[in-house]
Each structure stands twice: as C-alpha cells, then as structure tokens.
Image: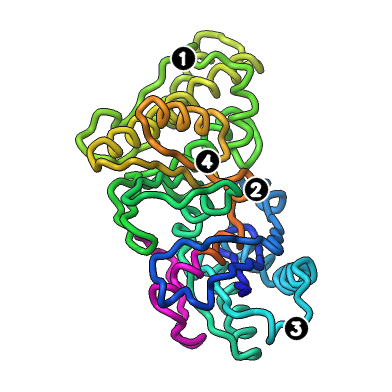
Amino acid sequence: MMILGIETSCDETAVAVLDIPDLASARPRTGKSPEEIKIRANIVSSQIKLHAEFGGVVPNLAAREHVKNISHVFETALKTAGIANFEKEIDLIAVTHGPGLGPALLVGIAFAKTIAMTHDKPLIGASHLEGHIFSNWLNNDFKEPKFPLLNLVVSGGHTELVLMRDYNDFELIGETMDDAVGEAFDKVARLLGLGYPGGPEISRIAEKGNPKKFPLPRPMLHSKNFNFSYSGLKTAVLYLLRDLKEKGVAIDEQVKADIAASFQEAAVDVLIQKTKQAAREKEVSAIFLSGGVSANTALRTAFKNMAEENGLTYSYPPLAYTGDNAAMIALAGYFAYQKNGSTGWQNVDMKPNLGF
C-alpha cells in the first residue's frame, strides 16, 4: 500500500512515496510496527542557499519558494516512484501540520487538501517531531524496539527529551529553556564568521581544533530536571572572542577551530549527560537520536559510546533522513492512521506550535 508524504514546515519542500505492505490491516493492528518499508521516492528541494544571506530562515520567503516548487517536487516524486495512476495506487496522504512556520505549513496543507479532495483520498495530519523520531525506522537493519524508550530530538528549533511508551504514546520530559542546540550552532558559527547553516560548518572546522583548549560552561548539566539551556553557552563564546581580541590574540583559522571544537564538546556533553540521566531514571533499555543535528559526527559518536557503556540499545537515522524530509512524514502518517484513521481533508488544520 502506498502513502504519499508532504513536508513544508520550514525551508525544505519535500514529497515522498512509501510502500508499506501491511497498511491495509494497520488499523486493526494498532501499535504494530510495519514489517517492511520501501521508500519508492524521497524528493527534497532545499532553500538553504536562498536563506543563507539572511543567516536564518525567513518565513514568508520560505512560503513563496514552497509555492514555486511544490508541484514540481510532487510530480518528480510520483515519476521516481513509478506511480502511473494516482487514484488507483496512492492509498493515504500524510502532510506535516505542525510544528513549523505558519506560512510554510499552509502551503503544504493546502496542496495536500487539494489533491486529497480531487482524487478522493484520505488525508491525515502528521507531526513533524514524531516524523523525526520515526526516521529511525528508515534504517534498513532497524529492529522493532522494546518500549518504553527515550528519544533525544535535536534540530534548529527543538532540543527535547521524549519518553515513548508505544508507537503513539509520547511524553515530553525535558526541553530547552531558550535556544535550541541547532540555534546555538548557528549563532556561534555567525560569531566565528562561518556560513549558514552553522552545524555543518562548526563540525567541519572542529575536526582540526582542540576541544580542551577553551573551557566552556555546561549550562544546566547538574540541574535536577532534564531541561536544557544553550543561550549561556553561546554568550560564553561571545565573551571568549571579546577577551581574546582584547589580549591581542589573532582570531586565525586555528583559533576558530579550537573555539568550534570546545563549543561542540560542551554542547554535546550536555546532551549526552542529560540523556544518560533520563535513561537511568526512566529505566529504559533503548535510546534514539533524531533531528537535523543528529547528523553531527561528534554527537553520533558520543551517543553510541554512551549507549554501549550503559548497556542500552541505540539508534539514529541514516544521514539522508536526519534533515527535514517527507519519508519520515509518510511514516508518521502511517502510525497516526493506525491510531485515529482519517477524519477527512476538511479537518486537517495547521498547528504551528504542535508539541508532544
């Protein structure tokens, strides 16, 4: 059975087609992981270059680009998937309805409603955050997990620890109190005169740096909860640069690399320690990593090492599915359909602040 996924929550226009053989019996088997997932198409049109000059995503500009691109991305996905007859071959349409940028979300939802109405297809709203978590299921060697498990969701807009008791049972147990970790990477990259997005740039130059060169704070590392804070770490880098300049230290490429490595280690350390603390307290046997920042090599390595040292099963998405994509939305739609079925295209509404 075929699921069409549509994602326009931020600055990627994405359409995917997933083939999940057991969808026909999904609803009576609520809570069942799909036995086989075939990604027939996963087309992503990125706007990174467009927003780079602004140092971040401009919502109305993003929406305009979605309007320009979505029909072409849709047609390309159908062609790539070998869909010759939409009405006969597509069984369910899933679209991101939140969280995200309001103007951007509206484009995808309007497009999804139009094709659902035109072709008389069931439509379901999918959570962007749940999509990131379910991107772990897109691993070819993924094995059905034992619940409960813990999810660390890290992206440009989110840093959250989520306890997952079942496929449709999520509890937010920790979140950032200010900047998300991805935002902190972007802001520190800007301070160092690097490009946007900051995550890949910081990671790139950090490989040549000494992470012990500059001791930076680990905000909220020892707090009695699972929350995060990254604005203080970003500010510490700002003050570090100021102090170095006042001392006459040239901010050359090596100094930048050392600062990037020191910042990255501090940021990752907090994520890892909080996840370990939560896993112990919640008595889970598995931990998942997801979101755009999960592509960071240092974070993936530290996450894997921590899991193995503590006897935990771990998973993170294939690199191709760490960023925003529609395959994860199609899969989130699959699980949402298991739980709720489709309520009709008229009832799918935008929810920019949707959470767990």
Foreground pick, 153 / 53: 153
Q: Which residue is mark 3?
A: 85
The amino acid type of the residue labelled 1 equals: Phe
Q: Which residue is mark 1?
A: 214
Residue 231 position, x and y percent, is 39, 36
SS state under label 1: loop
Which segment is the magenta one?
332-356
Q: CA distance from mark 3 to mark 2?
A: 28 Å
Q: What is the quadrant of residue 45 in the picture?
A: bottom right
Q: Is residue 56 visible?
A: no
Residue 110 position, x and y percent, is 58, 80
Magenta run includes residue 157: no
The amino acid type of the residue labelled 2 equals: Ala
The amino acid type of the residue labelled 3 equals: Asn
* Farthest residue, direction left: 224
Query: Of tags 3 and 2, which is closer to the observer?
Result: 3
Mark 4 vs 2: CB contact within 8 A = no
Q: Against 97, is 278 above or below?
A: above
SS state under label 2: helix
- If you read the primary sequence from the N terminus, does the residue marked by circle 4 or circle 2 appear first? 4
Mark 1 vs 3: CB contact within 8 A = no
Q: Which residue is mark 2?
A: 320
Residue 166 position, x and y percent, is 34, 59
Q: Which residue is mark 4?
A: 294
Q: CA distance from mark 4 to mark 2?
A: 11 Å
